[in-house]
């Protein structure tokens, strides 16, 4: 074997070695190919005990407060399951309204709260109106609209007056209560004309 052929082989081997090392370095430093994103499963991604969140108005006063003894958040739909939830609305000059249930759900931006199982709305007495209480198996609280509604049978008590219906829509801004389907009830004499004067 002549000297020039050995030199050529050594140069060729060195070039092959350099190419191999370069390829290895490129592969080692390159970001891995993006894998197709695996769909998120309906599994909890975080929990909270004795959960409480408040929404403040422009003055910094509490407008709404949502509490629960337990909250479980799910990654796929951003919804949360609640145990013993309560949502309370505070409006200046108006009676406090509290909605509760044994269990509930809240969507990702806390604009819709569903209350289930022994769900109850309680409006404190005030401004000449007696206490009002509504009971059902489900209430939906539309937080941004300040509305509570249900498509389930509901029992309403306002002072000494009692009514039942197949559904209800309550607007806390206008304080208008609408009952739907098979409405029955008895209005107490003290509630005629807008309520008690006390």
Image (cartoon, helix red, strand yellow):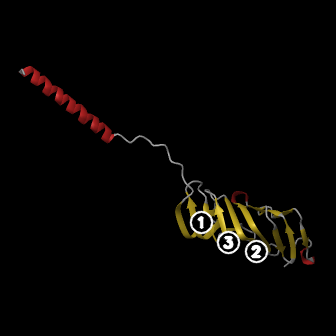
Q: Residue at left 82%, top 75%?
A: 130
> Would you say 131 lies left or right of 105 here?
right
- Viewer-closest of 5 and 74: 5
Quadrant of the image containing the N terminus: top left
Quadrant of the image containing the C terminus: bottom right
Q: CA distance from mark 2 to mark 3?
A: 20 Å
> Quadrant of the rendered structure where residue 28 is?
top left
- Camera sees residue 90: no
Expressed as whole percent of the image width and height from the top left, the position of residue 187 reads 91, 74
Classify mark 2: residues with Cα within 10 Å, few (<14), some (14-19) or many (20+). some
The circle drawn on residue 124 is 2
Expressed as whole percent of the image width and height from the top left, the position of residue 94 reads 75, 69
Helix, strand or loop at mark 3: loop
Expressed as whole percent of the image width and height from the top left, the position of residue 68 reads 61, 70
Classify mark 1: residues with Cα within 10 Å, few (<14), some (14-19) or many (20+). few
Q: Residue at left 88%, top 71%?
A: 194
Q: For marks 1 and 3, give the one nearer the viewer.
A: 3
């Amino acid at each position: 074997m002549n000297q020039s052929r050995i030199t050529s082989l050594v140069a060729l081997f060195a070039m092959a070695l350099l190419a191999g090392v370069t390829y290895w370095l490129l592969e080692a430093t390159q970001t891995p190919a993006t894998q197709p994103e695996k769909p998120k499963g309906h599994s909890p991604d975080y929990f909270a005990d004795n959960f409480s969140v408040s929404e403040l108005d422009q003055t910094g006063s509490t407008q709404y407060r949502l509490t629960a003894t337990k909250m479980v958040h799910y990654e796929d739909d951003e919804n949360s399951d609640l145990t013993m939830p309560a949502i309370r609305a505070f409006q200046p000059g108006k009676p406090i309204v509290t909605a509760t249930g044994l269990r509930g759900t809240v969507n990702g931006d806390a604009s819709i709260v569903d209350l289930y199982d022994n769900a109850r709305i309680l409006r404190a007495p005030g401004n000449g109106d007696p206490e009002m209480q509504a009971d059902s198996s489900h209430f939906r609280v539309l937080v941004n609209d300040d509305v509570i509604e249900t498509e389930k049978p509901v029992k309403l008590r306002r002072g000494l007056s009692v009514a039942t219906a197949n559904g209800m829509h309550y607007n806390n801004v206008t304080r208008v209560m609408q009952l739907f389907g098979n409405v029955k009830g008895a209005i107490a004499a003290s509630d005629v004309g807008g309520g008690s004067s006390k």
